[in-house]
Amino acid sequence: MSAMFEAVDVTKTFGGLTALQRVTFALDGGIASIIGPNGAGKTTLFNVFTGLYRPDTGAVTFRGRPLVGLRPDEITALGVCRTFQNIRLFANMTAAENILVGMHSRIRLGLRDVLTRGRRFVDAEGALWQRAGVLLERVGLRGKGNEIARNLAYGEQRRLELARALASEPALLLLDEPTAGMTQAEAGTLMALLRRLVGELGLAIILIEHNMRVVMEVSDRVTVLDHGEKIAEGPPREVQADARVIEAYLGRRAATGRAVP
Amino acid sequence: MIAATAAVAFVALSSAAVALFPRSILVFLLFQGSLLYAYVARIPGWLRATLLGAAVLVLMPAIGTYNGYYLEVATQVGAYSWAIFGSPHANVLFGGTGFPLPSWWFYPFLLIGLTVAAGTGVVLGLPVLRLRGDYLAIVTLGFGEVIRVLANNLDKPINVTNGPRGISPISRPPLPLEVSYAVGFYFLALLIVVVVILVNRRLEDSHIGRAWEAIREDQLAAQAMGVPLVRAKLLAFASGASFAGVMGVVFSAKQVFINPESFTFLESIGVLAMVILGGMGSIPGAIVGATVVTVLNLQVLKGLSLWLNELKNAGVTIFGYNLANLPTQLEPAKYERMIFGLILVLMMIFRPQGIFPARRRQRELGEQ
C-alpha cells in the first residue's frame, strides 16, 4: 500500500459513457505499458493521472500525496510529467525554447530577478540553456535547438516532446503513444533511450502504446484496458496469452480457438 | 559600407529637408522613413545607435522647437507606443489624479499610477481568465466601455470623476531644466518608452515571457508542462495595464484636461490597429505600428482631406463634373476614416503578420 504511484478504483464518466470503470493501477519503477483497443480509456486514464480530468470516484497518489484536485501544473511540479498522443508542442517557438518551458516549474527566479537581470538571473538562465542543449543531445536532436518546432520532422517532434517532458525533472513519465508514426528502427532507438533513462535516472515510465513489438520488448509489466475496465495485468508473456485480451483485440472466436471463417 | 553611407546620407538629407520645409508632410514622412531605414539597414551596431540616438535626442526636439506641430506628433507617438502593451481603459482610472496636490507629486504618481493600474488589470483579468483569443479581446474591449460609462456617471453620489464635464485643470509637473513643456513632455515620453521597452525585453527573454508565449501557443500543454495558468495570465494583465497606467498619468498632465470622451472605444480600436499593423508580439513592430497609425491619422489623411476640400472649394472640374456640386454626404472629410480602414484591410490581406513580425532569437546552446 505504499507504491510510488498508485491509482485506486478510478471511475470517470462523460454523460452516459463510462470511460473508466473502477481502474486500479500501481507502479514502483521500471516501465509499465497500458494497452487496449481504441476507445478503451487509456488516454482518459492519463488525463486523470495528470490532473486534466477529475475522476468521479477513486484516488490517485504519488509518493503518498493525493493528486486528485491538484492542477496539472502542480502535479508536474511534484514530478509527474507527460507527452501527448497528438503532438502538442509550442509550434512557433524554437526546440530549445520548448524545452525551457518544460523547466518552468523548476525555475526559482522571481519577477525582481527578471527585471533587474542581476548575476543570479544571468547565471540561472545560462544554466537553463546549457541544460536544454544536453537534453536535446540526449534525445538525438543535437544542433536542432534553434529550429522552430513546427519545422521539425514528425519523429523529431515526438522526441522533442519527450525532451520537454524530461526538462521538468519528472520521477514518473507518462508517454502517450511515443512511437506513433515512427519506423520500427526509430521506435527501437527510442525504446533503448527509455531503457537508459530508467537505468540512469531511476525514472518510472508508464507507456500507452499500440506497437506490440515495442510493448513486449520494453515493458516490465503490461496492463490491458477494454471498455474502461482493466481486463488483465502482468508480465508481457502472460498477458499476451490471456484469453480475455485476445478476445478484446481479435474477437470471441479467436479467443476460444475456433477457426475464423 | 555602402549601406552605412546610404543610411547616414539618408538621415542627414531628410533632416535637412525637414529643416527647409517644416510644413511639408511628405518631407516629414521621408525623415521617418530614413529612421526606419537606419534601423533595418545592415550597418554596424554603433552606427545605428548613433544615428537613431541623434535622431530622437537631438533632431526631433530641434525640429520640434522649429515647428511645434511635429513635436506634438512625436510625443503622441511616444504616448501611444506604450499603450500597445496594455489596455487603454487603465488610463481612465487616472481621471482624478494629481490635481489638488502640489505639481511635483506628478513623479510619485507615475509609480502610484503603475500600481493602481496593475491592480485594476488583475481585477479585470480575474473574470475573463476562462476566455481566449477573440472572445477575450471582445470582453476586454467591453470592459473598456464599461469603465468609460462608469467614469461618465461617477459624479454622484460622490464626485470622483466629475462626470462628462471632465477634470480640469490638471497641474503639470515641474521640469528639471528650463525647457518648454513641449520638449519636456517629449523627453518624458521618450524616457518612459525606453523603460517600457527595456522591461518588455527582459520579460520576453525570461521564463515569464516564455510561459506567456507557451500559453498563446497551447494553453493546455503549457499547463501540463508546469506553467501556472492563472498566475501567468494575471501577471500579463497586470504588466500590460501598469504600462498604460504610467502613460495615463503623463497623458492627463499633458492634456491638462481629461474627460471620459478621451477614452472612447475608437481609442481602444486605434491602439489595437497599431499592434496588428506593426506585428503582434514584436516590440519594433509595436513602435512602427504606433508611428504609422499616428502619422496617418494626424497628418497624411488630414492633409488629404484638406486638399480635397480645397479642390472642392475652388470648384475644380474633374471629368466634366464640378466638385463644388458634391452633395454633403460625400464631404471629403468623410474619406479619412474610409481610407484608414482600406489600408487596414489591405494590410490584413497582403501582410497579416504585420510590418515587423516577431522574430525568434537564435541562441548558443551547450551542445558540444
Image (cartoon, rainbow, N blue to C red):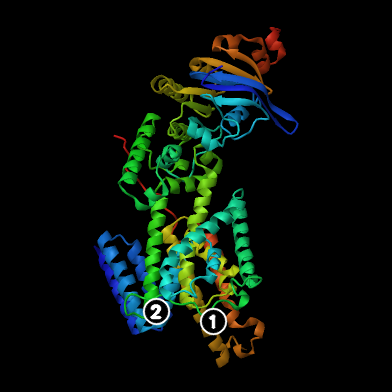
Residue drawn at x 55%, y 46% is: B230
Mark 2–mark 1 distance (CA, rounded to whole Å): 30 Å
Quadrant occupied by the C terminus of chain B: top left
Classify B21 as above or below B122.
below
Q: Give the residue type that dot 1 points to.
A: Ser
Is residue B292 in view?
A: no
Asked which secondary structure carries label 1, the reply is: helix
Instruction: Respond whether the residues carrying marks 2 and 1 are from the same subunit.
Output: yes
Give the side of residue A43 with respect to residue B74, left or right.
Answer: right
Residue A218 rendering spot, x and y as whole percentages? 48, 17
Residue B264 is situated, as x and y percent measured from the top left of the image, at: 59, 70
Mark 2 or mark 1, whichever is nearer to me: 2
Q: Is residue B166 above or below residue B287?
A: below
Residue marked by disc 1:
B305
Instruction: Write the residue at 73% across / 30% down.
Output: A17
Crowd around label 1: few <14 · some 14–19 · many ≥20 (10 Å): some
